Image: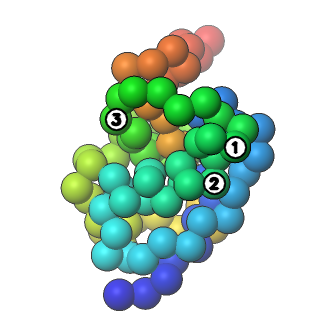
Amino acid sequence: MALFPLTSNFQEDFVLQLLAVDTENSMDELAAAAAVHSVGRRVKPRPGVLRVRRQGTDEAFPRNLKVGDAGLRPMECVEIYWEGSAGSVRAPRH
């Protein structure tokens, strides 16, 4: 158990947040921690499951994966998004 600093980029938020999570937290717990800083402040709440992915990738981390097992580096940016919502799937790269 150790605090681990990440940067979170929450869907529809224009502010990147510094997020201190525990290496034993799951990706669901990471997403919930990020939501505290964005949802209800600059982002409207919506139904659905929050997912986490490494910034710039298309594939979400498994929801039960622990932060310490994800291969993330300190201060790396993760994207938090609602699964199945507009903007959750990246446009094709040309």
Q: Is residue 73 left or right of residue 48?
A: right
Which residue is located at x 45 percent, y 19 percent?
Answer: 85
Q: Earlier in the sequence, mark 2 or mark 3?
A: 2
Identify the residue under disc 1.
41
Q: Is residue 30 left or right of residue 9?
A: left
Image quadrant in which you'd find residue 17: bottom right
Residue type at numbered disc 3: Val
Identify the residue under disc 3.
49
Identify the residue under disc 2.
37
Q: How is the image coloured?
A: rainbow
Image position of 14 with respect to 8: above or below: above
Labels 1 and 2 touching (C-beta < 8 A): yes
Labels 2 and 3 touching (C-beta < 8 A): no
Mark pair 1, 3: CA separation: 19 Å
Q: Earlier in the sequence, mark 1 or mark 3?
A: 1
Q: Position of residue 53 (x, y in %)?
A: 45, 44
Q: Position of residue 54 (x, y in %)?
A: 49, 47
Which residue is located at x 47 percent, y 27 percent?
Answer: 46
Mark pair 2, 3: CA separation: 17 Å
Image position of 88 with respect to 43: above or below: above
Q: Quadrant of the C terminus?
A: top right
Query: Circle 1 — which element?
Result: loop
Residue 26 in view (yes/no): yes
Which residue is located at x 49 percent, y 83 percent?
Answer: 3
33 or 74: nearer the viewer:
33
Q: Position of residue 82 (x, y in %)?
A: 44, 31
Query: Circle 2 — which element?
Result: helix
Image position of 15 with respect to 48: above or below: below
Residue type at numbered disc 1: Arg
